[in-house]
Image (cartoon, helix red, strand yellow):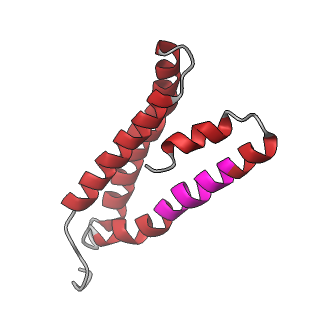
Amino acid sequence: MGFAFPMFWLLDTKDPLTITLTIIAAITFGQMVGFGVGAPWYSELFTARLRYSGASLGFQIGTAISGGLTPFAAATFMAWTGGATWPISVYLIVLALITIVATMAAPETAGEPLK
């Protein structure tokens, strides 16, 4: 959420080194950190009988909805605003807020044996 606006400010510099470092930072601290904690967490949300299909379906459906619609949404927002990137930043923040709410609503499994 904190990188949503600065990311586009840095990309708008049009400096190749700045753009490269911005993309590296976004992937490293955004995507990879999320994947690092996500995999074990998804596994803990389901019993052994449902673990593979539950984690896979949840992840794939979420990715299709969020990741699949994001390029279309970004292009639409930019078209509506004449090329401004702030609506995309707001969209990313809204998606992050949805993620936070979903995470807080998920059951706490710390200290419980895996079933």
Between residues 63 and 23, which one lies in front from this camera angle? 23
What residue occupies the far right of the structure in this picture?
Answer: 16
Of the pair 14 and 72, the residue shown nearer to us: 14
- Determine whether 70 is above or below 84 in the image: below
Horizontal side of 77 relative to 62 (left or right) equals: right
Magenta stretch: give its range: 22-34
Q: Left or right: 102 with respect to 1?
A: left
Using the image as rendered, state which of residue 100 and residue 115 is in the foreground.
Answer: 100
State the quadrant of the C terminus.
Answer: bottom left
Residue 11 occupies which quadrant of the picture? top right
Residue at the location (79% across, 47% down)? 17
Above or below residue 40? Residue 75 is above
At which x and y percent is residue 95?
37, 42
User: Measuring 75% from the left and 34% from the top, which residue is drawn there?
Assistant: 14
- Tally the numbered discs: 0
| Magenta segment includes 23 | yes
Give x and y (percent) for residue 63.
43, 45
Give the dominant element type of the magenta stretch: helix, strand or loop.
Answer: helix
In this picture, residue 4 sits left or right of residue 50: right
Residue occupying the point 43% across, 40% down: 92
Residue 48: % across, % down: 28, 73
Res 32 → quadrant: bottom right
- Which one is nearer the viewer's eye here, 80 or 72? 80
Residue at 26 percent across and 67 percent down: it is 46
Q: Is residue 112 above or below residue 90?
A: below
Q: Is residue 8 magenta?
A: no
